[in-house]
């Protein structure tokens, strides 16, 4: 009797579970999820634009500081070299879509140069290190 009841219940439960399986997201691909600029993942166009704005804003802050004579030409050139390195790293990382780690690394590098700019403005010696 138990076998008969179990045999009748198994197909019925499978029919109820099928819609739940249909709603589950697909498993991740073998290499993990790739969050490129066009797939609507973590890295979306707004974050990409924010990173570029930060880098461009840093360049403008260096130019403004040099024009206001709060840093010297030599200090500004050194900081511009640092910004160029960040722009180069951004271009290389953006080829395959920026990952979370790329974004954090670029933000860290921007903050380091921002801090260097702040220190150069505050030291008043107009000399690169």
Image (cartoon, rainbow, N blue to C red):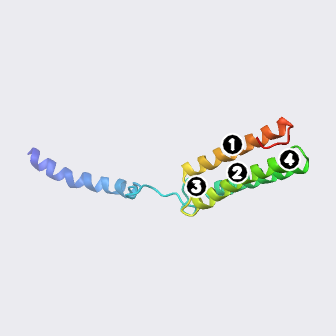
Q: Gap between marks 2 and 4, in whole Å?
A: 16 Å
Q: Is residue 61 visible?
A: no
Residue carrying label 4: 72
Q: Residue furthest left?
A: 1
Q: Which residue is mark 3?
A: 43
Residue 120: percent from left, percent from top: 80, 40
Where, by quadrant of the figure, is residue 36 drawn?
A: bottom right
Q: Nearer the viewer, mark 1 or mark 4?
A: 4
Numbered disc 2: secondary structure: helix
Q: Earlier in the sequence, mark 3 or mark 1?
A: 3
Question: Which comes before the other along the chain, label 3 or label 4?
Answer: 3
Q: CA distance from mark 3 to mark 1?
A: 22 Å
- The x, y position of residue 51, in whole percent, is 67, 53
Point out residue 104 in the picture as x, y percentages from the top left corner: 60, 46
Res. 13 in view: yes
The spot of residue 37 in percent (x, y) is 58, 61
Q: CA distance from mark 2 to mark 1?
A: 9 Å
Which residue is pictured at 75% across the width and 53% down the height? 80
Q: Nearer the viewer, mark 3 or mark 1?
A: 1
**Mark 1: secondary structure:** helix
Rounded to the nearest angstrom, the CA distance separating label 3 from label 4 is 37 Å
Question: Counting other residues with Cα less than 10 Å from the Cα at mark 2, is it few (<14), some (14-19), or many (20 or more)?
Answer: some
Quarter placement of the C terminus = top right
Cα gap from disc 1 to disc 4, whole angstroms: 19 Å
In the rendered image, which residue does mark 2 sit on?
A: 82
User: Which numbered disc, 3 or 2, marks the residue that appears first in the sequence?
Assistant: 3
Q: Is residue 65 left or right of residue 117?
A: right
Q: Is the C-beta separation of discs 2 and 1 under 8 Å?
A: yes
Quick one: label 4, few (<14), some, or many (20+) residues within 10 Å? some
Camera-near label (3 vs 2) is 2
Asked if the residue under mark 2 is in contact with the one under mark 3, i.e. CB atoms within 8 Å, the reply is no
In the foreground, 80 or 25: 80
């Amino acid at each position: 009797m138990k076998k008969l009841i179990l045999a009748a219940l198994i197909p019925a439960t499978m029919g109820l579970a099928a819609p739940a399986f249909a709603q589950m997201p697909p498993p991740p691909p073998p290499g993990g999820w790739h969050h490129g600029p066009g797939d609507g993942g973590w890295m979306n166009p707004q974050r990409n634009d924010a990173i570029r704005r930060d880098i461009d804003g840093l360049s403008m802050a260096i130019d403004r500081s040099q024009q206001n004579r709060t840093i010297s030409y030599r200090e500004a050139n050194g900081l511009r070299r640092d910004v160029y390195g960040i722009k180069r790293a951004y271009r290389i990382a953006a080829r395959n879509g920026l990952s979370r780690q790329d974004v954090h690394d670029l933000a860290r590098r921007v903050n380091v140069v921002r801090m260097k700019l702040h220190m150069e403005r505050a030291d008043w010696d107009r000399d690169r290190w």
